[in-house]
Image (cartoon, grey):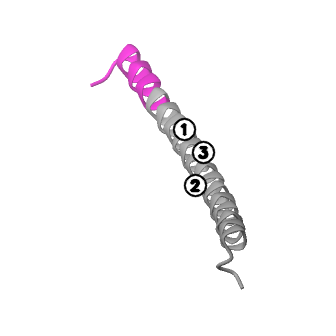
Amino acid sequence: MMNNSQSEAEQATAQAKAEAQEKTSQLMEQASNAAQSAQESMQQAGQQIKEKAQVATEAVKNATGMNK
């Protein structure tokens, strides 16, 4: 048979576990959001680099007469 202190300790343990699980869930969501944001930023940067490379390629072609 459990006494009051055991019951209180088990309740406190259960509460701490629930809080830890909730905090873990929040941190995982924040990490996921950060990863998504980083992926989008990298895609935008890649697109900008691609566009600049295309402009540079056209400039070289124009300068060397290859675009005629």
> Residue at point 41% right, 25% down?
13
**Would you name the residue on which mark 2 appears?**
39
Residue 53 higher or lower than 68, as above or below: above
Q: CA distance from mark 2 to mark 3?
A: 9 Å
Residue 4 higher or lower than 40, as above or below: above
> Residue at point 55% right, 49% down?
35
- Give, as a three-letter code, the residue at label 2: Gln
Q: Is residue 48 left or right of residue 19?
A: right
**Would you name the residue on which mark 3 appears?**
34
Q: How far from the left and from the top, in percent, is residue 64? A: 66, 70
- Queried whether the magenta region covers residue 50, the answer comes back as no
Image quadrant in which you'd find residue 56: bottom right
Q: CA distance from mark 1 to mark 3?
A: 10 Å
- Farthest residue in the bottom direction? 68
Give the mark nearer the N terminus: 1 vs 3.
1
- Queried whether the magenta region covers residue 8, the answer comes back as yes
- Give, as a three-letter code, the residue at label 3: Ala
Q: How far from the left and from the top, in percent, is residue 48? A: 69, 59
